[in-house]
Amino acid sequence: MRLARRLMLVPATLVGITLVTFALLHALPGDAATVQAGTSRGASPESIAAMRHDYGLDRPLLRQYGAWLARSARFDFGVSLVDGEPVRAKVARALPVSLSLALLATLLAFGVAIPLGAALGYYDRRRWARASSAALYGGYALPAAAVALLVLHAGAPWGARTLVGMLPAAACLALAETVKLARYQRGALLGELAADYVVTARAKGHGARGVVAHALRNALLPTVTLLGAELPALLSAGVIVEQVFGLHGIGMMAFDAVLTRDVPLLLAITTVAAVATLAGVLLADLAYGLVDPRLRGRSA
Amino acid sequence: MAMLARALGALLFVAFTPACKRVAKPVAADGGAVVVANVTRPDGPTIVQCAPTGCPGDGAAPPRDGGELVVHVEAEPAILCDLVEHDAWSRWIAENEIMETLLYQDPWSGKITPRLAATFELTADALTLHLRAGVKWHDGKPLTAADVAYTIGRARDPAVGADQRSDFEPVSTVETPDAATIVLKLTRPAPFLKQALAHLSILPEHLYQGKDVRRADASRAPVGTGPFKFVSWHRGEELIMERNADYWGEKAHLARVRFKFVRDREVAWELYHRGDLDLLWQVPSSHFEDARNDPKLSGHRLLAWTPRAYFFVVWNTERGRLADRRVRRALTMLLDRPRFNQVAFSGHARDITGPYVPGTPSYDATLPPLPVDAAAAKKLLDEAGVKTMKLTFLASAGSRTVEQLATLMKEDFAKAGITVEIATVDFAVQLDRLRHHAFDASALQWTMLLEQDNFTLFHSSQAAGGQNYGSWKSPEADALLDQIRATGDDDARHALDRKLHRLVYDEQPYSFISMREVETLMQRRVHALVPSQDGFSFARAWVDPDAAAK
């Protein structure tokens, strides 16, 4: 039921997101024609006008968007305004790279953050745990570019497309997220440990194991909620990591598309990112059910 | 072998040291042999200081055929078609290597020689070119005059907006009396036409006919007549070209050239050290010292050369006080250019005072850079009645150089009571504002040709929609620019160029800052590879297949 309702919302969400992207791109000064004319000696008002006409940029905005929507409903995302290559081919090439990178990073981040956060929460009174919590802030503050360059310098592979080859890049991408999630997890567990039911459990003579098992399950909920948001965020956050490790993914492509005002490419990427976000939310919903039986079959 | 090379290098150093001192003064572009200092040291690479007349090859052992050269490319071109892609790397990859031009211009001396055109005659009313016989496109079809007529037609089409368009303005018609002859009829002298033909890659009509040059497949997978054939292009990763075994001229030695797209210079530096790149086109300025003194780079070659490009600040002369030449001169004198060169380029930069290539006859070498003199600048500002002034500097986001310039400018100008606000925008916005004259000051870099036509930069007619972003309108400059375009005689035209240089120097529509020096690093196994503004000598380069990359 919930799934069906969620799926029904997908088209409306996609239209909304792409419409906003489209409007924002057009609100910016300069378009693909002015960027391509650049500072060329031969560029003239008529050459820019001719380009605009070729790219359909001289038509009314709503008609441009309508035409894009009609085409993309048939999975035809048009051609890039920069090099004439079909957008679908571009995205199809970059998406697997970014998706693998983002999935790896998500696995790493959650895989490390949940036990780490739980341990820090449980042993909160110990000195080492307090010190580690503080150190995590330091990790969060490290600039991603510097960390990535250091990892590359240490001998990490460049331009590797295999999962193993992407691990160092994924680790760099996951670093900040791991810290954030671990701190989140620690806080959540601390909150649960102070709850009445835990006090009761302790009073009833439950050992540390049993107490943590109960508390952690509840403390996982907020972290899992983040899963929905993390995956798409990592998908687009990869720009620096992609650049340093020579992985040409969606992040880099989106960045370039904004700079060159490549409307069809950026709209396609936005659509992909929106689908990924919706998929992430769905995934989080399903994970809720796993973590908390009370939520199974109910709307989150 | 390495010992021998080192000894030879040391000998060269001794032999050329006095000569090197001589080239401190600019020399005529067509004059003299290549002068160079080769310094080989055990604790660093062989340093080759290129002269204004060019960079020397290493002239070592006889060339060997085969092998692959891996080249670092910083900016990946969008497409490979020099009509509409203005990026230098687009030219460096395609022009002269995959595609070819009718004529060839030596990148240093400017001398023009035949290439696809075996002969050419320029008269007062026509340029006649005869194509070389037996030249074939990489797909096997013959090159004909129709291809040339088609390409020139595209270059002249205002809708295409080709960089070379204005050079073809004196051409009234393009005729092809037979399959090997092209006649360009002229309405007036066309002093820049030969040079334009040396920078216009001929396109295969059969692959472009009826297609938009930007959208055609052939602009992404070019088919040319050159010494290399296009093989593949994986966007964001690499582009490969291979030796054309059927080339009409002297065949290339390299079996393959692999261009690797690495945007970040620090990353490229790392990859070069791993041996993943044979050629690092530009050492990051943060590593200038390391590059010269790293013992691991012993036997590598470091070529220091100056591309034909200058960095400048353009003043919007429509904006209040900036209309006054005294104010513009004062601003140039306030701007501490040597300090900027030190901060931004670690001092690896050359002075420039006007819009021509230093060392060419168009450049007036008698003009010294305006002094950095705050007191004199204040005096000029007083004369102009300027007490305080507020300026917005339009900076392009992502350019470290511009960011540094803006910061230093803010400091320097504050000394004279001028407040600078920095507006950082992306390139598209910057272009839009420049075209609409919606700025006070901005910084850009222009690349020059050896025979530079500055009409589009400084003619008053180019303020509306052209490149005269500062809207500088000088009747004197207009007259000179018109005259330059109509003067066929080289000496007479160069004299006019120098006059324009002096006028621009006096009026300061731009503050000329400097020309940046580039340090190109290459592995030990690479030979006969030299850089220039028009590209690298890939067709003559070779690699030692026995030597490991590292």
Image (tube, coloured by chain):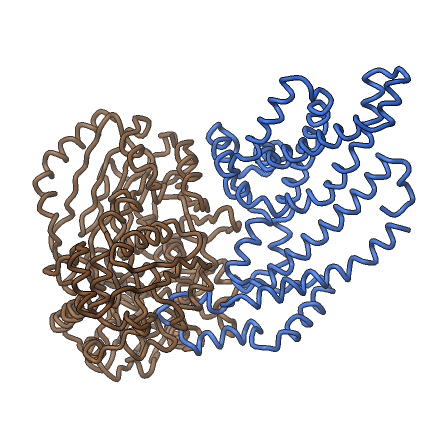
Q: Residue at x 51, y 49 (%)?
A: B236
Residue B64 shown left or right of residue B39 in the figure:
right
Residue B207 appears in the figure: no
> What's the residue at 70%, 27% (across, down)?
A117
Q: Nearer the viewer, residue B122 or A94?
A: A94
Q: Quadrant of residue B388?
A: bottom left
- Chain in blue, by letter, is A
Residue B209 horizontal/vertical position (percent): 49, 73
> Which residue: 38% across, 66% down?
A39
Q: Position of residue B95 (x, y in %)?
A: 36, 58
Q: Which residue reaches farthest front?
A: B387
**Which quarter of the picture shows residue B158?**
bottom left
Whether residue A134 is situated above or below residue A180 in the rendered picture: above
Q: Could you tell me residue A224's position as x and y percent?
A: 76, 38
Quadrant location of residue B436?
bottom left
Q: Nearer the viewer, residue A42 or B502?
A: B502
Q: Residue at x 18, y 48 (%)?
A: B51
Chain B shown in which color? brown
Vertical arrangement, residue B165 with respect to residue A110, above or below: below
